[in-house]
Image (cartoon, rainbow, N blue to C red):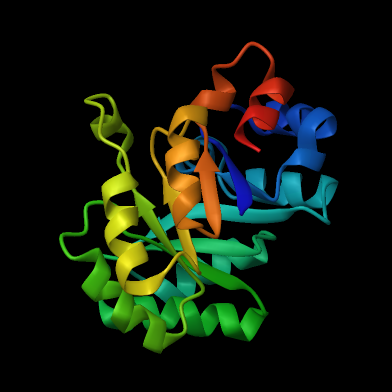
């Protein structure tokens, strides 16, 4: 299982300092949507330039203009970009084709999708690399988690190519582990911990 750490509220300089101390414990560095909104794609460029060996995911949440927006992410240095599962088939396909052209990967974010299991069957035929079962941050405040979605997915597809995100903490990790997702995405738990390295080790 790979660990993806989402950096949403930090600045790119803070991310660099974090990686200097803890990068060895992280498999995928996520440049979160709020960080990209605040600093632009330069945040992706800066982190990839300083840590070229780290796998960097740009959480662009593409919904339209798939070729254009995916290319912007890849040109900035992203190894993986995200596109929403609610995007049209043409948009999803254009993001995938752009990734293939650049030798990169695509993660489809199923946030708020009503039929993620059905959609994933379509996306697998398209060759999409990763499917993210994502409980929205606003919904995690009411105690919702991606665990139930993961259980359904596991029964149909297993855990291969599946990522989970939303309210992930050590207690939830223990429940998630039995379904063997390929990637676990953690953000707030680590960001809000007093000792970031200890928090990362707890997740591992």
The answer to which of 107 and 69 lies nearer the viewer is 107
Q: Measured from the top left, where is residue 84 in percent x and y?
A: 34, 62
Q: Which residue is drawn at 25% across and 34% down?
A: 144
Q: Residue at x 63, y 74 (%)?
A: 104
Looking at the image, is 193 positioned above or below residue 172?
above
Asked whether residue 9 is in view, the answer is: no
Q: Which residue is drawn at 50% across and 68% down?
A: 161
Disc tally is 0
- Quadrant of the drawing holding the N terminus: bottom right
Q: Measured from the top left, where is residue 39 in percent x and y?
A: 57, 38
Asked whether residue 79 is in view, the answer is: yes
The residue most toward the front is: 178
Looking at the image, is 197 positioned above or below residue 81?
above
The answer to which of 12 and 140 lies nearer the viewer is 140
Q: Is residue 81 left or right of residue 14?
A: left
Looking at the image, is 70 positioned above or below residue 145?
below
Q: Measured from the top left, where is residue 63 in percent x and y?
A: 32, 63
- Quadrant of the drawing holding the C terminus: top right
Q: Measured from the top left, where is residue 102 in percent x and y?
A: 65, 79
Q: In this view, does 105 lie to the left or right of 136?
A: right
Quadrant hosting residue 13:
top right
The residue most toward the bottom is: 125
Looking at the image, is 194 positioned above or below residue 171?
above
Quadrant hosting residue 200:
top right
Q: Is residue 20 left or right of residue 135?
A: right
The residue most toward the left is: 114
The answer to which of 86 and 68 lies nearer the viewer is 86
Q: Is residue 192 left or right of residue 148?
A: right
Q: Which residue is drawn at 71% across and 43% down?
A: 26
């Amino acid at each position: 299982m790979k660990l993806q750490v989402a950096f949403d509220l930090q600045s790119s300089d803070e991310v660099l300092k974090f990686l200097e101390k803890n990068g060895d414990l992280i498999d995928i560095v996520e440049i979160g949507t709020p960080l990209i909104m605040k600093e632009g794609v330069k945040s992706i460029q800066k982190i990839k330039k300083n840590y070229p060996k780290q796998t960097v995911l740009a959480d662009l949440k593409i919904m339209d203009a798939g070729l254009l927006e995916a290319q912007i992410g890849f040109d900035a240095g992203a190894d993986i970009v995200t596109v929403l599962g609610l995007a049209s088939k043409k948009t999803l396909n254009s993001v995938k084709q752009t990734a293939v052209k650049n030798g990169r990967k695509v993660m489809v974010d199923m946030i708020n999708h009503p039929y993620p299991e059905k959609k994933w069957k379509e996306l697998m035929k398209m060759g999409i690399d990763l499917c993210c079962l994502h409980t929205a941050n606003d919904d995690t405040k009411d105690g919702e988690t991606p665990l139930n979605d993961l259980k359904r997915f596991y029964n149909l597809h297993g855990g291969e190519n599946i990522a989970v995100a939303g309210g992930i903490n050590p207690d939830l990790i223990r429940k998630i582990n039995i379904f063997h997702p390929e990637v676990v995405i953690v953000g707030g738990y680590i960001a809000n911990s007093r000792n970031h390295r200890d928090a990362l080790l707890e997740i591992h």
